[in-house]
Image (tube, grey):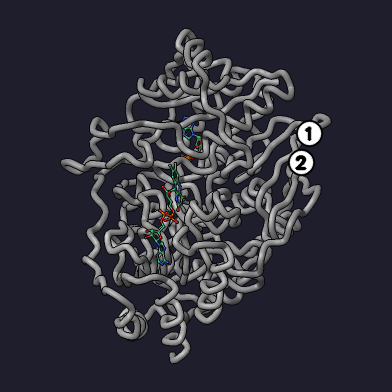
Amino acid sequence: MKFTIIAETNGDLLHQTTYQLIGAISNIGSKSTVICPNGKGSSEASKIKGVEKIISVNGDCFDLFDGSAWASAINSVCEGTVIISASPNGREIGSIIAAKRNIPIIQDVTGISPGITVTRPIYSGKATETLEISGESVITLRPNAFENADIGNEAPISVVDQTSDLRVAIIEAINKASERLDVTEADIIISGGRGMGSVDNFSHLESIADSLDAAVGASRAVVDEWGMPHRMQVGQTGKTVSPSLYIAVGISGAIQHLAGMRSSKYIVAINKDPDAPIFTIADYGIVASWEEALPILKSELMKL
Amino acid sequence: MNIAVLLKQVPDTTAKINVSNGKVDENSVSKWSMSPYDEYALESGLQMKEATGGVLIAIACGPERNKKMLTDAAAVGADTLIHISVDGILDSIQVQNFLAAVIKNNEVDVVLCGKQAADTNAGSTGPGVAEILDAACVTMVSEVSFIENKFISVRPSISGTEKVSTNGLSVFTFDKGVSELRRPNVRGIMMAKKKVIETIKPENLGLEGSDSERVLLKAQNSPPEKEPGQIFEGVGEIPTIISKLRNEANVI
Ligand SMILES: Cc1cc2nc3c(=O)[nH]c(=O)nc-3n(C[C@H](O)[C@H](O)[C@H](O)COP(=O)(O)OP(=O)(O)OC[C@H]3O[C@@H](n4cnc5c(N)ncnc54)[C@H](O)[C@@H]3O)c2cc1C
Ligand SMILES: Nc1ncnc2c1ncn2[C@@H]1O[C@H](COP(=O)(O)O)[C@@H](O)[C@H]1O
């Protein structure tokens, strides 16, 4: 079985998830072809173990994101099973490539073994399922669910030029988002809920986030009731995240919130109610008010 | 204008999921609901219908119980209800081909659906259906309107949000919308009960048979048990927790 991996980039560099996509395929004993849109990250990718060759697909269709244009250009050089990150853009490109080839797509996979057999969470993590795939498919892998591949390779890079049409025209850029890291990107997330008392108190979370290079998240209660931006919302109707560390402050742990963050590697909860459901999934629970806990947390972090 | 809204029925977010003998026991799901983002797609469709004097066609592909969801959609204003009746498990491309075939047969001008369904959280259907229909696709929108023969929608961008326009047949996948969701009134509920649901069998859609069973369900399981955590009263153990996160877990 041939594997084509579509690299995800961050500016001119590879995004961490690309190392994970390559690592996941190496771990099942296969080599992969890596496609780098507009050549970004191609020399970096050629040094990663498990990569057989790189195809740099160049075209002005990659200058802005239009899933359909990206998928057309990328699809022209895809072979075999296509692997891409389960990021929002990855899911969209993957879906279109799958539809172009009339093959199934399996999204948000957290485990893969030869065969190919994949595992993915379903019902917001209330269950998992294992699927056996025969023939070609597109598979999106959940960020942070796989180990990074190692460095130590010198794979050849070839270049292909492609054009494809944009169907979506941008007519107006609206507000600027804050410069803060997005929750789906971050390795550490500190989220606040109604227990924070007011929007102003989120500054305490932000200052800790700054020292940890973390993103700030929120429960739906504060998004709906205090007008925090929806992009910060974690949960069933917000973002699904799986960072290494998730710190929940003043969040009760409603089932819909847990749905978005239960697969975090480590969960720390700060809540003054010892019976708050968030404690049932926390690795470390601190039964205290945030007013007491956050200053100590902050000063301890400063000592590191 | 013919507005198609794709509705997927999923276990209600509050429903408990039981697994027995390597399979989720669907019969024990206490409540089935319209997937949360589909509600925003439906609301936006209703507004577009009111603004343009169009017809709202609600389409669901799934087992018999989907009819209840379609009736719920009629109670808030869906005009035409189409049920693609299937019982077994379908893979993503089978569902997309069925939905796209029904959309084609109904001379639809715009398709609205959820950005991800709450059961698999996939987000495959909108972009896939758009590709099959050769339509434009805008994902994760919060609003869509039809102005001067163009669809204007708002989607997230790297730097915030952006307004984009598309021409011709377009598919929009909905994130949380900006409008409050409407609730049915008594009259709506009564009228909906009388509404006819058009039922279609996939074999009557005139599609070539696809290779079935490309994705075989091997097992469903309860999520891996987490080791029970440590809960500390008060703030005294915060230094210990930080040191464990640093030295044992290596996450900070
Ligand atoms: C269809 C649907 C989808 C939903 N989707 C989402 C979603 O995506 N994300 C989401 O988060 N929710 C979602 N919800 C809402 C969810 O059910 C809860 O209502 C919400 O998560 C509660 O937010 P909260 O924990 O901030 O508030 P609360 O439940 O009010 O909890 C506040 C907590 O703060 C604690 N507290 C109070 N004061 C302090 C203090 N000084 N110090 C420390 N702790 C304190 C309290 O003990 C309490 O546990 C959804 C609901 C539905 C029906
Ligand atoms: N079987 C289905 N019947 C009708 N609409 C569906 C179906 N599956 C998916 N959809 C629509 O596509 C959206 C995304 O679904 P998914 O690709 O499964 O995450 C859903 O929110 C629905 O709007």
Q: Is residue B38 left or right of residue B110?
A: left
Give the image location of residue A302, x and y in percent.
Answer: 47, 88
Judged from the image, the secondary structure of the residue bearing numbered disc 2 is strand
Residue that numbered label 1 is attached to: B150
Q: Is residue B141 left or right of residue A211?
A: right
Residue A32 in view of the camera: no
- What amino acid does circle 1 point to? Lys
Q: Is residue A168 above or below residue A227?
A: above
Q: Nearer the viewer, residue A160 or B13?
A: B13
Mark found first going from the N terminus, 1 or 2: 1
Q: For marks 1 and 2, give the CA distance.
A: 6 Å
Q: Residues within 10 Å of mark 1 (few under 14, many from 20)?
A: some
Q: Position of residue A148 (x, y in %)?
A: 43, 73
Q: Are marks 1 and 2 on the same chain?
A: yes
User: Mark 1 belongs to which subunit?
Assistant: B
Q: Which residue is mark 2?
A: B165
Q: Which amino acid type corresponds to the residue marked 2 in the rendered image?
A: Ser
* Image point (31%, 52%), residue name: A117
| Quadrant of res A276 | bottom left
